[in-house]
Image (cartoon, rainbow, N blue to C red):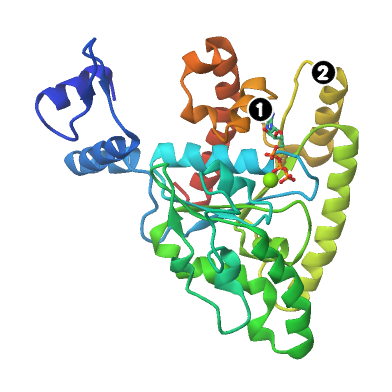
Amino acid sequence: MSDGYLRQLSIDGLGPTPDLGNSGRRSYTLEQINELRRYLATARPKEAARFFPQRRSGEKLQVITVANFKGGSAKTTTSVYLAQGLALQGYRVLAIDLDPQASLSAMFGYQPEFDVAENTTLYGAIRYDEERVLMKDVVRPTYFTGISIVPGNLELMEFEHQTPRFMLQNRGKAEDLFFRRVAGAIAQVEDDFDVVVVDCPPQLGFLTMGALNAATGMIVTVHPQMVDVASMSQFLLMTSDLVSVIEEAGGRLDYDFLRFLVTRHDPRDVPEQEIVGLMRDVFGADVMSATAWKSTAIANAGLTKQSLYELTRGAVGRSTYDRAMESINAVNEEVVGLLNQVWQR
Ligand SMILES: Nc1ncnc2c1ncn2[C@@H]1O[C@H](COP(=O)(O)OP(=O)(O)OP(=O)(O)O)[C@@H](O)[C@H]1O
Ligand SMILES: [Mg+2]
C-alpha cells in the first residue's frame, strides 16, 4: 500500500491506531501490521490473498528443516532470519530447536540452562516413556510477534540415548518407529502454524533423522570453503544411506524442495567464487540463487543474540546494514517463492 493510503486509513480511524512520533511519522508494531493485513483482507476481499499470506484450506503445513552436520555452516543464523522474515510477512511460524546446545533458543531469549525446565524441549513430546507430554505443552511464545518456539537444551541428548534401547526392546514394531516421532509431534499443533522451521544439530543423529522425516522442504547450508564442501558431500552420502534405511522401513521422504544455501559468503573472495561456481555446475538449480553474504553486522548482532531485523540501521551503519539485509531478504524471498510453489499460488 502507498504511505498516503495508510495515512488516510489512520486519519479515518480505520484499522489499528499507530504510534504518532514527533515529526508526525506513524509507526506500527508487527502486531498492528498484522491487524492491518486482516483489516485490508476483509475490506478488500478480492485482494485478500495479497494482504494476508497465511495458508488457506487445502494448503498444507510446511516444515523446513535446516541441516548440515558441518558445525558453523550458519544453520541457526539461517533459521533465525528465516523465521523472522516469514513472521514479518505475516506467516505464523513455529521454530523448533533440535540442538542440545540450543543457540536458537538463546537467540529467542530462552537461556537453555535457566529458562528451559525439564520436559519442556521437543524431547518431552517425543520421548518413549510415560512422562511424554503433548506438543502444545512444549510450544511457547517468543517476544517476536508471530513466532512460537519449542526450545532446546541438553535433555534432547536423551533421545539419542533412549532410541537404541527402545529399538532393541521393540524390534519390528513399525508403528512406533523413532523417525516418525518428530513429525507426529508437529502434526499435533499443525492447525496453529503456516511454516515450521527446524534448526538441526551439527550431527546426523536420531533427532536429525526425525527432522529429515518431518521435513517437507530441506535447506542445506554450506559455507563455501573446500573443507566444508567436502564435509557436505559426506553429509549427503550418509544422508542417502540413512534415507534408504528410513524408506525401507516405510518412512516418508518426499520433499517438495531441497536447496543448498551458500552462507557466510564473501563474493569478492576468488576461491569462494570458484567453489560456488562448482556447486552451481554440479547441483544446478538446487543451489539457491540468493546467497547469505558474510557480514560483520550479522556476526556482531549475533553476539548480543539479536538479528538485524531487530536493530535499526543507525545502530549498525547504513551501508553495512543495507548490504546485509539485501542479501538476507533475497534469501527469504526465494524461500517464500518455494512455499508459494508448494501451495500452488
Ligand atoms: N552471514 C553471516 N555473516 C557473518 N557471520 C555469520 C553469518 N552467518 C552466521 N555467522 C556467524 O557464524 C557463526 C556460526 O553461525 P551459526 O551458529 O548460525 O552456525 P550453525 O551452523 O548453527 O553452528 P552449529 O553447527 O554450531 O549449530 C556465528 O558466530 C554467526 O554469528
Ligand atoms: Mg546451530
Whether residue 251 is visible, yes or no, is: no
Q: Name the residue under label 2.
A: 269
Q: Decide: is 319 above or below 292.
A: above
Residue under the image location 25 percent in, 36 percent down: 36
Asked whether mark 1 lies closer than 8 Å to ligand 1, one says yes
Front disc: 2 or 1: 1
Image quarter for residue 222? top right
Whichever of labels 2 and 1 marks the residue nearer the N terminus, that label is 2
Specify whether 166 is left or right of 342: right
Badge 1 amino acid: Ala
Tell me where residue 3 appears, x and y as whole percent. Answer: 26, 18
For mark 2, give the secondary structure: loop
Q: Residue drawn at (57%, 11%), measured in percent from left and top?
A: 319
10 Å crowding of disc 1: few (<14), some (14-19), many (20+): some
Image coordinates for residue 226, horizontal then vertical, percent: 90, 34
Where does residue 207 sit, x and y in percent of width and height? 69, 64
Residue picked out by circle 1: 299
